[in-house]
Amino acid sequence: MSVLVYTESEEGKIKKIALEVVAYAKGIADQMGTTVTAVSINANDISELGKYGASKILQVSNDKLSNFNAEAYADVIAQAAKSEDAKVIIVSSSANSKFLAPALAVNLEAGYVPNVTALPESTSPFKVKSNVFTNKAFASTEIKTDVKIIGLGKNSYGLKENETSAANEAFAPNLDAHDFDMEIVSVDKATDKVTIADAEIVVSAGRGLKGPENWGMIEDLAKTLGAATACSKPVSDMGWRPHSEHVGQTGKPVASNLYIAIGISGAIQHLAGINASKVKVVINNDPEAPFFKAADYGIVGDAFEIVPKLTEKLKEF
Ligand code: FAD
């Protein structure tokens, strides 16, 4: 009986969140006295999975699975779980995994808890802690089904290395016509920019920027840092920035390593979406701006002076 993880990849490359999921699975496997088996679908380079604690890697290689398909991927993982007799399955909390996990839960009649933040409080009974109400509260949930599925919240466990010698094995699932009742036939990327969901660093700006014409300096800072750009709600409501960048209670949640907030007051609805980010830096010309109370580092001053200077300095590195 092993702990099974689904290791997401993009264009053949294992994603960083998948490595965190493997590290977390190793933590659970140690609690349960078992090992970690990873399932990778059409990934070219799986060499890093052993570094984070996978003992076995089931490699699926199938052209029909070249585009993400929740039903088909869930079927593959369910078959792998059955062949490994896995009772605990870990996925990330990415948009794709949030699609996939419910289908997997139905397939295996398993209980599923998303946004889990830590190792189980106990494995018998099996109790996990997760973020709920857009990260405003924690829930402790007991999963009573035989098979249990956990969706690990991004950046909640960290990339803990645990070098393990991993055995690779080809795995050929039996795909059924119903797996492809709905199928993505092509994907055209809307942008090559880093997305908020995948970003390690997010540069976000608010109404303090006065107008959309001033976003050049935000884009420049983001590009220098390899960051995604984001904004407050009024900024997207006014059409200064696309809605896809709106962060907060009614927008996207951000769980980056670094969140830089520029000209954003720090209203509770904005903070609700970013409090899972690790380090928060605030630039605001009002020393009383509420955001400073939630900040790890704060700069009181005019964004129009500070941001270009910061970017210039960062470009030297
Ligand atoms: P403002 O509140 O206008 O703040 C602008 C800030 O810029 C000020 O702090 C000011 O000091 C600073 N500033 C001005 N000039 C400069 C300068 N030159 N240099 C540096 N700083 C400067 N908001 C969200 O963001 N996300 C949500 O998901 C969200 N959901 C909501 C849901 C509900 C039900 C409601 C009622 C509200 C929601 N809001 C949300 C809106 C939220 O309450 C705030 O109104 C909003 O976050 C404020 O946006 P802002 O900080 O960009 O603008």
Image (cartoon, rainbow, N blue to C red):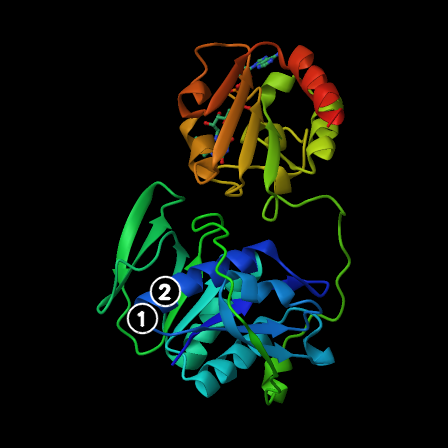
Q: Is residue 249 visible?
A: no
Residue at which label 1 appears: 32
Question: 287 or 9, which lies in front?
Answer: 9
The image shows a total of numbered marks equal to 2
Q: Is residue 52 left or right of residue 216?
A: left
User: What amino acid is labelled 1 in the image?
Assistant: Met
Q: Can residue 256 be seen in this view?
A: yes
Quadrant containing the N terminus in the rendered view: bottom left
Mark 2 → mark 1, Cα distance in angstroms: 6 Å
- Secondary structure at badge 1 equals helix
Which residue is drawn at the image coordinates 41% and 29% (left, top)? Answer: 268
Q: Is residue 126 left or right of residue 29?
A: left
User: What amino acid is labelled 2 in the image?
Assistant: Ile
Residue at which label 2 appears: 28
Q: Is residue 82 above or below residue 45?
A: below
Task: Look at the numbered disc 2 and say if its residue's Cβ is closer than 8 Å to ligand 1.
Answer: no
C-beta proximity under 8 Å, tags 2 and 1: yes
Which residue is drawn at the image coordinates 71% and 79% (left, top)? Answer: 64
Determine which quarter of the picture holds residue 307: top right
Quadrant containing the C terminus in the rendered view: top right
Q: In this view, does 313 lie to the left or right of 121?
A: right
Q: In this view, does 83 lie above or below 59?
A: below
Q: Position of residue 86 (x, y in %)?
A: 41, 79
- Secondary structure at badge 2 equals helix
Q: Position of residue 299 (x, y in %)?
A: 54, 15
Quick one: label 1, few (<14), some, or many (20+) residues within 10 Å? some
Which residue is drawn at the image coordinates 47% and 68% (left, top)? Answer: 101
Determine which quarter of the picture holds residue 57: bottom right
**Numbered badge on residue 312:** none
